[in-house]
Image (cartoon, rainbow, N blue to C red):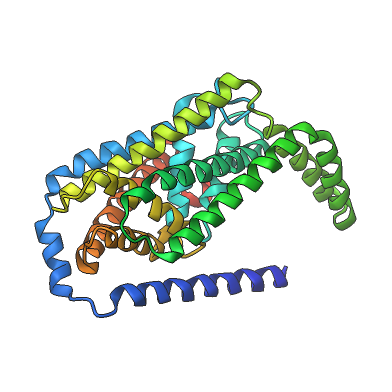
């Protein structure tokens, strides 16, 4: 246990150092008067529209989740939406994207959903997101004059992850029984007693969950919803650009969305602090927007998301009579 905690602390320190380096790069040679001017130029009347677009994105994400869970079609959309918001809130207040685990965990407490199957649904969701982002990135490249070298490397890595993930999903779907037995044998070599039995059950639930999509129609719903969801998020960022007085081409919102997705994929501090700003500044640099204006934009868009998600998450917990700690306890 002490070794696990030591490793966790090491990862936290490593992520903290990374974020400090990123923030140092962003803040280097900044003209803070220009940053302040960026805030002054903003038209905050667009805030309600940004909140609506953010809520719509979560609704689309929750609807897609229905089709990624074996029992999804019987689960109320309200529960899926609340668990999704809670999970993203957890990622804003806890390190290492803890919300990825928090989402299926709280849903398994609120609805008859097996936790292992819920985790499998998040894995499928992330693979689908990686592939959609890579495709959108490929369509965006032609609209950039001089994309940075790191962008190509990041896109290639994301594409490899998505491709390997798809192959893994197909193999797990075709040979789920064999994978389940293999996983349970490995667990039996390490664990004994009640924990062994519980982990065996979790492995079985996980590989069962990977087979939630059973027809071409279900796959089509997931793919189409994923594309719409990401393009809607691009609209969110495009409206934010207009609100900040940055009248850029329509592809700018897509560019911001893609580069933020690539940047926040790197493990970091809670709330994607630093990596979110890095993605925004890098994206807007492709349109000759200065670091000061880009940083102002990134802060406003980050705050809108943080306040909206954390506020909604706390409201959901209050409505259910739970605390953040209580929601995670069984």
Expressed as whole percent of the image width and height from the top left, the position of residue 4 reads: 69, 68
User: Residue 250: image x %, image y %?
Assistant: 24, 43
Answer with left or right where residue 310 lies relative to residue 7.
left
Residue drawn at (85%, 38%) of the image = 178
At a point 52% along the width and 32% down the height, the residue shown is 65
- Count of numbered marks: 0
Q: Which residue occupies 57% across, 22% down?
A: 218
Residue at x 25% of width, y 58% of height: 287
Res. 94 visible in picture: no
Whether residue 90 is visible, yes or no, is yes
Horizontal arrangement in the rendering, residue 1 relative to residue 237 (left or right): right
Residue 216 position in % (x across, y down): 60, 21
Instruction: In the displayed orientation, state which residue is furthest to the bottom.
Output: 29
- The quadrant the C terminus occupies is top right
**Residue 88 or 106: which is nearer the viewer?**
88
Residue 125 point in image, percent of width and height: 55, 39
**Rendered position, 249 above or below 178:** below
| Depth order, front residue of 206/134 | 134
Up-down relation of residue 43 to residue 112 (above or below): below
Q: Is residue 237 left or right of residue 134?
A: left
- As displayed, is residue 306 above or below residue 70? below
For the residue pair 183 and 232, the one nearer the viewer reads as: 232
User: Which quadrant, please, contains the N terminus?
Assistant: bottom right
């Amino acid at each position: 246990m002490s070794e696990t905690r030591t490793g966790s602390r090491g990862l936290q320190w490593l992520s903290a150092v990374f974020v400090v380096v990123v923030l140092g790069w962003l803040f280097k040679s900044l003209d803070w008067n220009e940053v302040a001017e960026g805030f002054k130029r903003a038209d905050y009347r667009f805030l309600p529209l940004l909140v609506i677009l953010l809520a719509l994105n979560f609704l689309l994400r929750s609807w897609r989740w229905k089709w990624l869970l074996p029992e999804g079609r019987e689960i109320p959309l309200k529960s899926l939406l609340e668990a999704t918001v809670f999970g993203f809130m957890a990622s804003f207040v806890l390190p290492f994207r803890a919300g990825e685990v928090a989402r299926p965990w709280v849903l398994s407490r609120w609805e008859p959903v097996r936790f292992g199957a819920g985790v499998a649904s998040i894995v499928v969701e992330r693979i689908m997101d990686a592939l959609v982002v890579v495709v959108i990135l490929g369509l965006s490249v032609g609209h950039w004059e001089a994309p940075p070298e790191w962008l190509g490397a990041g896109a290639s890595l994301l594409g490899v992850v998505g491709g390997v993930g798809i192959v893994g999903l197909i193999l797990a779907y075709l040979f789920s029984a064999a994978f389940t037995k293999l996983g349970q044998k490995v667990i039996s070599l390490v664990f004994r007693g009640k924990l062994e039995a519980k982990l065996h059950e979790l492995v079985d639930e996980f590989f069962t969950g990977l087979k939630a999509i059973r027809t071409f129609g279900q796959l089509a719903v997931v793919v189409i919803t994923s594309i719409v969801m990401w393009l809607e998020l691009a609209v969110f960022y495009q409206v934010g650009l207009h609100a900040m007085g940055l009248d850029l081409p329509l592809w700018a919102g897509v560019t911001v969305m893609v580069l933020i997705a690539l940047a926040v994929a790197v493990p970091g501090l809670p709330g994607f602090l630093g990596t979110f700003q890095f993605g925004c500044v890098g994206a807007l640099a492709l349109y000759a927007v200065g670091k000061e204006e880009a940083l102002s934009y990134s802060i406003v868009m980050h705050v809108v998301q943080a306040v909206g998600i954390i506020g909604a998450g706390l409201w959901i917990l209050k409505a259910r009579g739970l605390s953040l700690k209580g929601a995670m306890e069984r």
